[in-house]
Each structure stands twice: as structure tokens, then as C-alpha cells.
Amino acid sequence: MKDYLNPNKLYRDTLNGKVSGVCAGLARHFNVESWMVRAAAIVAFIFMPMVVGIAYLLAVVLLPTRY
């Protein structure tokens, strides 16, 4: 089975993403609604902006894109 067809692998989902697809990819990986992941990311960003910002940028750079 090809890696891009593996549902358990973590990808950035650019088709369903709003900014870069990180939250949509996490939602797809953990099988939850994307709005819940986005809301959690916003709340985490309010309380820990530097940590969440760096983690988000690293995810954008390091995660492969799923089209």
C-alpha cells in the first residue's frame, strides 16, 4: 500500500484546510471534526502563543502534503 493512501499516517490536508491544512490533517488522522481541532488550536494559541506558533510552523514544514 502506498504511503499517500495510508489513513493512519499524518498529513497536511490542503483540500479541507483553511490556512495550510495542519488542523484538517490532524482532524482526519484522529477521526474528529476539523472545527474541534481548529478551536483547540485557537484556545492553545491564546494561552501559549509562542509554543503553538512554533509547533504550527514546524508542522507546516515537516508534514507531507496530502492533495
Image: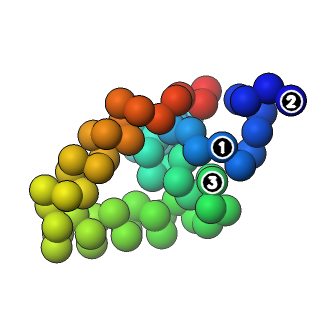
Relative vertical location of residue 4 with respect to residue 24 in this rendering, above or below: above
Give the secondary structure at mark 3.
helix
Front residue of this view, candidates 35 and 61: 61
Give the residue number, with chain letter if any, for mark 1.
Answer: 9
Report the side of 5 relative to 30 (left or right): right
**Based on the displayed image, in which of its 4 quarters is residue 61 positioned?**
top left
Q: Which residue is mark 2?
A: 1
Which mark is drawn over residue 31? Answer: none
The C terminus - image quarter: top right
| Residue positioned most to the right | 1
**Left or right: where does residue 28 sit relative to residue 26?**
right
Compared to residue 39, the image places residue 15 above or below, namely above
Residue ID for mark 3: 29
Instruction: Mark 1 or mark 3: name the one nearer the start of the chain.
Output: 1
Q: Position of residue 12 (x, y in %)?
A: 51, 38
- Going by the numbered disc 2, the residue's amino acid type is Met
Q: Is residue 37 above or below residue 19?
A: below
How many numbered markers are drawn? 3
Answer with mark 1 or mark 2, whichever residue precedes in sequence.
2
User: What crowding class fits label 3: few (fewer than 14 Cα within 10 Å), some (14-19), or many (20 or more)?
Assistant: some
Q: Mark 2: which secondary structure?
A: loop
Amino acid type indicated by mark 3: His
